[in-house]
Image (tube, rainbow, N blue to C red):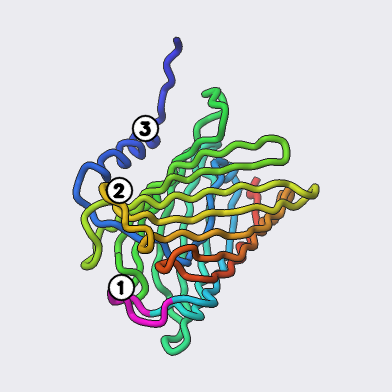
Amino acid sequence: MASIKVPPFLSLGIAGIVLSILFSVEVSAQNNYEIQVYASQTQAIHSTMFELHSNYTFDGTTQVIDGVIPDNHSLHETLEITTGITPVFEIGAYLFTNYTPGYGYQIVGTHIRPRAMAPADWGIPFGLSLSLEFGYQKPAYANETWSLEIRPILDKQWDKLYVSLNPTFGISLKSQYNTSVPTFEPNVKISYALWKNAALGIEYYGDMGPVNQFDQGSQQNHAIFIAYDLLNNSKWELNIGAGFGLTPATDPFVFKVIIGRKVRWK
């Protein structure tokens, strides 16, 4: 049987997942700055995607929790810029902003996200990529100031049906509140192309707590979004969703819009 040669950046990423589970680091929690289930396809080489993530929390927390200000009636807007470096590798950068009544408008932090995709000639019967996201957020807006997200991405298209699975691990590198174990934060997307250029679907976002002992059910975060996606457009991206919390620890109602514009340099 022929062996598969794994690129160095993928090897390091896979090793990072193992090491993060074995060693003591602090966990991160999900937030409302970027609500998206990733597809495995990386940005095409010689092109850049400019995205604006706008998420409004209609019904959220009303008190300071672990030093983090309330998110009730908060508008989270994130600028994401992703550039294709090679046919299977991209780098993305984020700028997070927040407007909360009584606290004003703030630039919250920045993240950087390299991502590598399994080449087609590997012959894997589904899409596969690995995303690593690292960065800083102000302590008043996140109970982990420095964090790392490790996100494997598996997806598959069957005619009009699309499924994506992101079994994500959140790791807080600096926090005075969280425990010393990574959290498991799975994301799932299932959509169906009802029309030629549009699909409707369901997106799931979860945070089950530390991987060595999940939180009790009521303390876990589970949300379901009903989502619309623009399809078959080479220049524009559009994702709209209404999200509903399923547990007391989850924001009851969040509305999101992701709009993106792709620019080809060659």
> What amino acid does circle 1 point to?
Pro
Q: Which of marks 3 and 2 is nearer the N terminus?
A: 3
Q: Give the range drawn in magenta.
A: 61-69
Quarter of the image holding residue 140? bottom left
Alpha carbon distance from label 3 to label 2: 27 Å
Residue sitting at x 31%, y 57%: 215
- Disc on the earlier residue, 1 or 3: 3
Q: Is residue 81 above or below residue 54?
A: above
Q: Which residue appears at 20% of the width and 45% of the height?
A: 23
> Which quadrant of the figure contains the C terminus?
top right
Q: Which mark is residue 139?
A: 1
- The percent position of residue 95, horizontal first and vertical second, equals 46, 66
Q: Whole-Å distance between the Cαs marked 1 and 3?
A: 34 Å
Give whichever of 77, 48 is nearer the camera. Answer: 77
How many angstroms separate mark 2 from mark 1 (CA)? 24 Å
Which labelled disc corresponds to residue 8? Answer: 3
Q: Kindly report which numbered mark, 3 or 2, lies closer to the viewer in this rendering.
A: 2
Name the residue beneath numbered marker 2.
Answer: 211
Outermost residue on the bottom side: it is 102
Residue 196 in view: yes
Q: Is residue 94 left or right of residue 264?
A: left
